[in-house]
Image: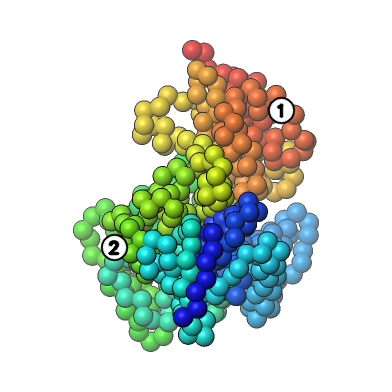
Amino acid sequence: MADRKTDTVVIGGGPGGYAAAFMAADLGQETVIVDPRKNPGGVCLYEGCIPSKMLLHLVKLKHEAESAESWGLSFGKAQVDLDKMRDAKDRVISQLTKGLGQLSKQRHVTHIRGTGKFKDANTLEIAAEGGKTESLTFSHAIVATGSRPVAPPGMKTESNLIMFAEDALSLPEIPNSLLVVGGGYIGLEMGTVYARLGAKVTIVEMTEGLIPGADRDLVKTYQKASRKTFDQIHTHTIVSDLEEKDGKVKVGLRSTEDDNESRERTFDRILLTTGRRPNSDSLGLEHAGITVDEKGFIPVNEKRQTETGHIYAIGDITGAPLLAHKASHEGRVAAEVIAGKKSAYEPATIPAVLYTDPEIAWCGLTEREAAAKGVNVTVTSFPWAASGRAVADNAADGKTKLVVDPESERILGVGIVGRGADSLIAEGALAVEMAALARDVSLTVHPHPTMSETIMEAAEVFHGMATHIYRPAKET
């Protein structure tokens, strides 16, 4: 057993882990990353955020080419080569992960390939590649081991015809029929990929509607714009009685609103996107004096400290929202605190994005949350059908809305559905973070013609003075 010492060890090399390690190194800490992969990147880069967005980009190109005929352009029927798509995806992953490996070397961050387990509050036992075991003594540790997908309770998942997102991203085939269980981020994104590649996709969601965290008007606009994407969508529905037979999967679809018998359906493949579980059960946290909650998440304070003060936790393992950009921000905060900086995790908002077609994005207080909390708000919206750029780009099926405090005029939340919402939401997040007023946004000159003008005009609607729609302010 080899012995090492370091100032800070980061367990996990995902977006939160490597952001924390790089910041710690930049602030003068001797830093070690413990992660089993060759280079940092984590699930997000290897089999999550990045490859899924690349595939969504490709199917978006295919869809736009097929839709261009009504605008006077014809490209013929698109040919799909799965082998080339897989190769292209792998090249992108390799390029980006190698880049992170190079950044690690430039910062003199030591990368130990393996998995770590706490031996005590200052010692990590590392099961390294090649069967070696190393003991690492540290002054500070940052736990960033992320999460993993889980199946619905009681569902057997041994069949090769049942996939999680990682399996689906490998593009094993394009099935004739695909059942996606879960109508959230991953389910709709991967469902879009397979539907646009030719599969008949059915979405099943157990709650009242798709994308439970988003306002219903945004979801309604999305569903209308993408109504031809999916074969069927079933809400208030759960999957039961799963059985593989003759190379297909037979399932029962049961409504949660009544006690009727389930309807039997048969699919070529099933994709499960029903939630994730924190990777906290094999870390030996109890040896470091750290307890987890009933769901396995590690409680932390605003500095990302666990109950063992010199050990920190960030990202998915600390609870919702399970988003890469949240983990990255937390990682930088933890590293700054370790270095003696006055830092805390206290963002006014963490933006959420679905990279569907069209995209949906929101930040801050939603209209539904305001109603549930009894917060008095004014909601203004600007339809993209009134945007010259949106109409010119064949993207008029969109909407930008603001949730505003009627007394102070402070922008409390922003919601966008439409092409490019993933990038547009950053302005909304800045407005919420900086406590901007509706007038601040309306007086900011936005370039024309752009989709960003819809944010400005939504702010103008608050005062009843939007240029491109007539919607006078209500008298109070």
Q: x%, y% of residue 357?
A: 59, 55
Q: Secondary structure at mark 1?
A: loop
Q: Which mark is residue 444?
A: 1
In this picture, is 129 found above or below 370? Answer: below
Q: x%, y% of residue 388?
A: 73, 38
Residue at image location 50% in from the left, 17% down from the top: 407
Q: Which mark is residue 254?
A: 2
In the foreground, 240 or 127 = 127
Distance from the alpha carbon under mark 1 to that under mark 2:
51 Å
Image-based side of 438 in relation to 66, left or right = left
Residue 367 can be seen in this image: yes
Which mark lies nearer to you, 1 or 2? 1
In this picture, is 303 found above or below 372? Answer: below
What's the residue type where badge 2 is placed? Arg
Q: x%, y% of residue 223?
A: 51, 51
What's the residue type where badge 1 is placed? Thr
